[in-house]
Amino acid sequence: MSNQLDKVRELIELRTQARLGGGEKAIEKQHAQGKYTARERITMLVDEGSFEELDMFVEHRCTNFGMEKKKYLGDGVVTGYGTIEGRLVYLFAQDFTVIGGSLSETMAKKICKVMDLAMMMGAPIVGLNDSGGARIQEGINALAGYAEIFQRNILASGVVPQISGIFGPCAGGAVYSPALTDFTIMAKGMSYMFLTGPKVVKTVTGEDVTQEQLGGADVHATRSGVTHFAVDNGNEGITLIRRLLSYLPQNNLEEAPIKTTNDPIDRLEDSLNEIIPDSPNKPYDMYEVIMAIVDDSEFLEVHSSYAKNIIVGFARFNGRSVGIVANQPKTLAGVLDINASRKAARFVRFCDAFNIPIVTLVDVPGFLPGTGQEYGGVIVHGAKLLYAYGEATVPKVTVTLRKSYGGAHIVMSCKQLRGDMNYAWPTAEIAVMGAVGAVEVLYAKEAKDAENPAKILAEKEMEYTKTFANPYNAAKYGYIDDVIEPRNTRFRIIRALQQLSTKKQINPPKKHDNLPL
Ligand code: HXC
C-alpha cells in the first residue's frame, strides 16, 4: 500500500468520525427525543448533494475541567454552504450531540466564518440552533464568541436575509442572535427560548414555571411575538425555511425570484363585490380578500398567531413577491394597537430593506383607546408603523376596503406617506372619525338642549355619513388615485406594481435614522 493511499484512508476515517458528531449513543438520544441531528437537518434543508462542509477538523482549545480529553472533530457545529432551489445559501447547524451544542470560542469562529462569506457573496444565512448555551468550561471566551456572532448579525441586518430555526434549547444571551435576525422559527414541544431558565426564575421571583410556559413555541408565537413562526415539528420547520426563502432576494441589491404562474392577471373575483356587510359594525374575513387576489391563493403568513388584528405575510402578484399588510376586521374590529403596530412596522421595514413591494389592504376603525394602551406607550409604538411606511421607498400600493379613520388612516400607507397608488373600493369610508363619535363631539350640546336628542343625533349622523363615509371626498383631493370595482382588485394591483417596477426614490443621506424604539 502506498503512503499516499494510507493518507487518503486516514482522511476518510477522520471524515467518518467527524460525521458522527458526539457519537452513536448521543445521536440515539437525539432521535429518541424526536429531534434530528445537525447534519440530518442540513441534508433536509438544502438541494440534494449541494452541501459543502467547512471546518470539519476544527477542535476546541479549552483545557479547563479536563476538556483537553473531551474533543470532537468539528466542535459542536456543522457549517458550510449549499443551494436551496438552486440559490446559494450559507448555513450553520449546532450539533447537540457534541457537548450539548454548547458554544465554544472555536465554534463561534466557525459560525463567524460562514457569516462573513455570506456577506461577501451576498447570500442568505440560515442558522439552525440547538444548544445548551455558552460552553461553561470556556468562560469568557464563549461569551466573546457570542458577541462576535451578534456583531455580524447586526452588520448583516438589511444586507442579506438572516433566518433562525430553533430546534432545541436556546437559552441565556444566546437568544439574542435569533432576535437580531429577520425571521425566527420554533417547533412546538421542541424549541425553547428564554433569557433565564425555570430554575433561575424560581430562585429570583419565586415563580413556578415550566420550560414550555416560559419560552415554548406557543408562548413566543402568541404572547411575546419573539418567534415569527411556530411549526408542529422539525420537518415542517425545515420546509418552511425553504418556502420563506423563495419569497426573498439573495441580498439588498437584488430582486426576489419570479415564480411563473398560470393565474390570469385579469382574473375577476365576483365574490369581492359582495364581501362587505351592510352594517359597518359587522366583520368579514380579510383572509378571503387576500386569498382571492394573490397568485394561486398562496400566502405565507408571518406572525399568524400574534396581534391577529393585523395580518402580514408574503404573496405574489404575477409571479413577483410582495409583502401584504392588512387590517383584520374579524379580530378587535381591525383596530391598531401596540402589538399590531410593532408587528406590522417590523414587517414593512423588512420588505423595504429587501426591495419587496408592499400592498396594504385597509379596514381600520382607528387606534385602540384606553389607559392600557397609553401606559404601554402606544404613541411610540404606533409611530413605528407610521415611520416604517414613511421611510419605505419600495413600491407601495394601498387599497382601502371600508373604514379608514383618523390617525390610523394616515399610518396605513396613506398618500402623504408616499403611498404610490392609493385605491379605494366604493364601500370605503375615509374620514377623521366614525359618524357616531363625530356627531357626539359636534352636536352633544345641541342634542342636550333639544326636545328629542336622539332624533337630532340620528339626523346629524346621516348627514355626516353622507358627507364623509365614502371614498369620493378623498378622491376629490387626489388623496385616492381611483375608486375601483372590488372584483377587479387583483388586476389593478398588478398593473400598479408593473408601473412601479422601475420606481427610484432615495431618502436623504444620514448615518442612520432614529426610529422611535
Ligand atoms: C457545557 C453543556 C452545556 C453548556 C449542556 N452541556 N449544556 N456543556 N456547557 N452550556 C452538556 C451536558 O453537560 C451534557 O454533557 C451534554 O451537554 C448534554 O446535555 P444534557 O444536560 O444531558 O441534555 P438535556 O438533558 O437534554 O438538557 C439540555 C439542557 C441542559 C436543558 C440544555 O443541558 C442545560 O440546562 N444546560 C445548561 C444550560 C445553561 O444554563 N447554559 C448557560 C446559559 S448562559 P455529557 O458529557 O453529560 O453528555 C449563556 C450565556 C450566553 O449561555 C451569553 C451570551 C451573551
Image: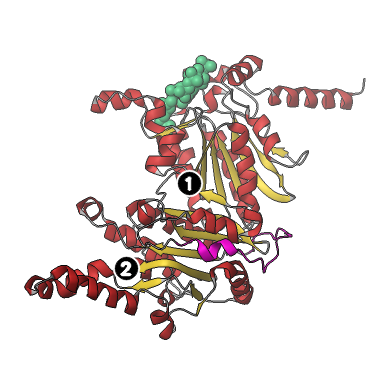
Magenta stretch: includes residue 230: no
Q: How many marks?
A: 2
**C-alpha distance separating marks 2 and 1:** 25 Å
Work out which quarter of the rendered image holds the C terminus and state it: bottom left
Q: Which residues are magenta?
A: 254-276
Q: Can you say whether 174 is above or below 485 in the image? A: above
**Residue at the spot 51% in from the left edge and 63% down from the top edge:** 274
Give the residue type that dot 2 points to.
Answer: Gly
Q: Can you say whether 483 is above or below 253 in the image? A: below
**Residue at the spot 48% in from the left edge and 52% down from the top edge:** 154
Magenta stretch: includes residue 264: yes
Q: Which residue is tagged 1?
A: 304
Q: Secondary structure at mark 1?
A: loop
Work out which quarter of the rendered image holds the N terminus and state it: top right
Q: Can you say whether 132 is above or below 490 in the image? A: above
In the picture, measured across the screen, residue 437 lies left or right of residue 280, that is left
Q: Nearer the viewer, residue 468 or 503?
A: 468
Q: Secondary structure at mark 2?
A: helix
